[in-house]
Amino acid sequence: MIPAISLSTNVTIRTNITVTSTPKAHKHKRPLNSTLNSLTKAGKLDEALRVIESSSSKSVTSEPNLEAYSLFLHSCISRKSLEHGQRLYLHLLLSRDKGNNDLLKNPTIKTKFITLFSVCGLIDEALGVFKDGLEHELVPESVWVAMAIGFSKNGYAKEALLIYCGMLSRLVQPGNFAFSMALKACADLCELRVGKAVHAQIMKCNEEPDQVVNNALLRLYTECGCFDEVLRVFEEMPQQNVVSWNSLIAGFVHRKQVFESLDTFRRMQGEGIGFSWVTLTTVLPICSQLTALNSGKEIHAQILKSTRKPDVPVLNSLVDMYAKCGATDYSRRVFDGMQSKDLTSWNTMLTGYAVNGSLQKAMEIFNEMVESGIRPDAVTFIALLSGCSHAGLTDEGQRLFDKMKKNYGLSPSVEHYACLVDMLGRAGRIKEALEVVKFMPMKPIGSVWGSLLNSCRLHGNVSLGEAIAEQLFELEPNNPGNYVLLSNIYANAGMWDNVKIVRDMMERRGMTKEAGCSWVQIKNRIHTFVAGGGFEIRNSAEYKKVWNQLMDAMEEIGYVPNTGVVLHDVNEETKSIWLCGHSERLATVFSLIHSSTGAPIRITKNLRVCVDCHTWMKIVSSVTRRVIVLRDTNRFHHFRGGACSCKDYW
DNA sequence: ATAGGGTTAG
């Protein structure tokens, strides 16, 4: 923890700045400094230190000069070599005690020590250097900025902002460096009010704000959701660079305007700005979200064409993009080609397999990961546990849950307990699931009750479902999904009166079931279908032809629609007509018409797939001999030859 | 010395 910084404001400000004079030129000094500099430049820091340490034993006048120490410290910072820096610090302290020139007072040296300690994570030490003599000297901007950056980089945005305030209270005039640092701190804290105050100071300042300051403003307003301000700063700044454009894209992502963000990315290419790895790590997750495999592949091609080496985060998001498009083979190829991997790389690959139902492969990745010395974290286990849950591997999942604490020292969070409860409930072991809820060390969150409610639906347990729903309605009164689950339970039991009661309750509370919506990317366009809509397409001759062919083939197989999934009390015929209008079916037929033969069809749905559509898709995959990958809110379904990878367990 | 980033859940 950081000690509270006390920056007393009632300090007499001295007008005469203490300038530390550099040691006077001496005939022995030059050779000493040049040896020191060449040792430092060669990276021989140990030898350099020996020269420094022995210099003081001879005579005062042979002390190395400021530039030599500066260069040495610069090298320590870029190598994050704490040890060498600490030894120099000690040396200077001793030298000061002997009454020599106090170089620790020098702003350049001070700045470098603060930076070194903070890049090494020793923020207390950095603060010590900063505070040393703070009361008695007029400290220039650079030192304040270095300290603030130190706090900021170590995750202490509030402290960074306090440093900025301290600087103002000492009447030190902030420049562009200080402004951008302060804006970053405000952005990290979502401190719009302070951020706007800094913006005002910038406008009043004589110095023109540079590109970095403008970009920091862009991020501040993006983070705080002030999109109008983002657009204004973007338009008004004299020149936008990649970072500015990245902020603009992030701004659209923030507002969930995913199509606009993709358009902005395209515009940026059109204007010859190009992209940076950060651009791609902003855009690739959009492709993941949209299952826009074609766009994702295009970006992959850009990466391959680039002469620069992609960094780990870009490749991680590429692995994720392919996985979210249901193409784990591609993910694996990228993953295997990575020269260095971090924890996220492993988690992403593992999660990709888990959500696509390849739990065996996920376990293989897990074992490889452990063997190569990477410590799994909480995310690793959430992926594994939810994977086990979906695959129905309850025993394996329970073993992992125990192993998590015993072998890896990770105490399970609510989310891990939610997975465990889900796993037991799905397997029909609802009593055990309830026991877990009773004895878990924290209060259950909505998702825990939610998964229990879903288990009641899967296993037709009406009375328990009612009890759980009551809890849930209190906890999450405005989540329509919970009401839909309860009415599903009633509908499956044929209790149509109760279905109506739930529906009326929803209406009274002003809630509507989210409309089913599916989409698919064909070439570069994403086509969206809403349940019961898409009439222009459904009335086309092409659509009718394909639809009728499918219906004939299905009738031959003996498919009968399962109308139980339609929750409204209408006659059987209307119910089956409504089923035909389910969005995933519209998207499927559309894809059959417009995609190239042989290629898998990839559809994404905003809700859970309904039982009847699931059956329907299995048959379509069989009669058309096409692979259909359907991603719903829960998991992936890979339909192939009449069967689904989820083994009807979801 | 200053601005921009990726993974998990019913």
Image (cartoon, rainbow, N blue to C red):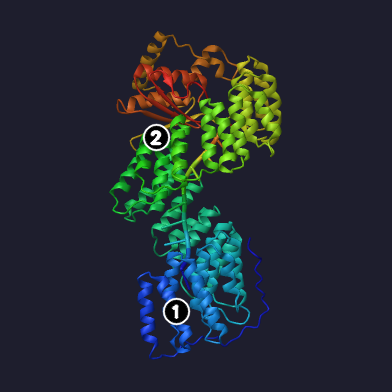
Three-letter code, disc 2: Thr
Q: Residues within 10 Å of mark 1 (few under 14, many from 20)?
A: many
Determine the secondary structure under disc 2.
Answer: helix
Front residue of A263/A379: it is A379
**Number of the label disc, if any, that sits on residue A52:** 1
Residue type at the position of mark 1: Ile
Q: Is residue A351 visible?
A: yes
Question: Is A567 situated above or below A224?
Answer: above
Secondary structure of the residue carrying tag 1 is helix
Nearer to me, A592 or A231:
A592
Rendered view: A358 above or below A102: above
> Residue A123: image x %, image y %?
57, 65
Q: Earlier in the sequence, mark 1 or mark 2?
A: 1
The residue that mark 2 highlights is A328
Q: Position of residue A296 (x, y in %)?
A: 37, 41
Residue at 49% x, 26% y is: A531
Q: Quadrant of residue A549?
A: top left
Q: Chain of mark 2?
A: A
Disc 1: host chain: A
> Which is nearer the eye, A269 or A131?
A131
Q: Residue at x 65, y 15 (%)?
A: A495
Left/right of residue A620 with respect to residue A387 in the rendered view: left
Marks 1 and 2: same chain?
yes
